[in-house]
Image (tube, helix red, strand yellow):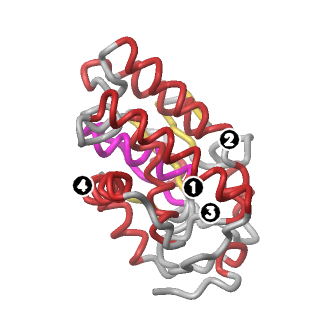
Amino acid sequence: MQTIDLDPTLSSTLEQARQPGLTLVIGNKNVSSWSMRPWVAAVAFGIPFTEVRVLLDQPDTSANIARYSHAGRVPVLLAGEMTVWDSLAIIEYLAEQFPDKHMWPQDVAARALARSIVAEMHSGFSELRTQMSMNIQARLPGRGRTPGAQADIGRICEIWEDCLSRFGHHRFLFGEFSIADAFYAPVVCRFKTYGVALAPAMQAYCERVLAHPAVARWVEEAMRENDPTPLHDLDMPRE
């Protein structure tokens, strides 16, 4: 996988991003939870792509993202002349283009549940997102534990317990690593950052997710970043 840091002064960067094949435009790995989801899924399932990284929280961030998508947010997937934005749309596109990868569970009931919990992650848990934003490098035990965030944590654990007991067989949410695990991987990172105490089975699941090669690679690369992200770094002590 080739990585490109966006240099807006070089037109060749944009030309390269539009070459045949897939290009995934992401934000900083330390803080961009939405970028993490399709990146982890693509890496986990061996889908080749070129990575373009746009630094967030910079004066030119919006202009740089607009070079790829008028939606103004990352991630963005470029497939030749086609643009796919929004993490869930990207995931669905990849699953359609690579059906042999079985990114969704193959069992009908499991797949229906997986799509439901991914949609819930995509549209819900607003208090957790607001109060416990992703910052992989930080260690903030106990921070952000508002009643709403605590309720979100409880609901997430309920989802994990249901999936693991019905389909997970003490592995991932649906046995084999799937899109569902990729979508909840940023939550696993949040729980580590904020020192969320979990039941043993839930903690064991988090450890399995963090040990997965695709997730471990994202975290390792996030830990090496030293790019300023002012909106995320306020009052965020590092490990």
Q: Specify the amino acid type for callout 1.
A: Ser
Query: Disc 1 to disc 3, how far (Cα)?
Result: 7 Å
Query: Disc 2 to disc 4, how far (Cα)?
Result: 27 Å
Label 4: which residue?
Answer: 213
Say few, some or many: other residues with alpha carbon within 10 Å of mark 3 (under 14 / 14 to 19 / 20 or more): some
Query: Disc 3 to disc 4, how far (Cα)?
Result: 32 Å
Residue at 38% across, 66% down: 219
Q: Specify the amino acid type for callout 3.
A: Pro
Mark 2 or 3, closer to the camera: 2
Q: Is residue 227 left or right of residue 133?
A: left
Q: Specify the amino acid type for callout 4.
A: Pro
Closer to the N terminus: mark 1 or mark 2? 1
Q: Position of residue 94 (x, y in %)?
A: 41, 28
Can residue 10 be seen in this snapshot?
no
Task: Determine whether 160 is above or below 192 in the image.
Answer: above
Of residues 85 and 112, the one drawn nearer to the viewer in this rendering: 112
Closer to the N terminus: mark 2 or mark 3? 3
Query: Disc 2 to disc 3, how far (Cα)?
Result: 34 Å
Mark 3 or 4, closer to the camera: 4
Label 2: which residue?
Answer: 124
Query: Disc 4 to disc 1, how far (Cα)?
Result: 34 Å
Say few, some or many: other residues with alpha carbon within 10 Å of mark 2 (under 14 / 14 to 19 / 20 or more): few
Label 1: which residue?
Answer: 11
Label 3: which residue?
Answer: 8
Of residues 5 and 75, the one drawn nearer to the viewer in this rendering: 75
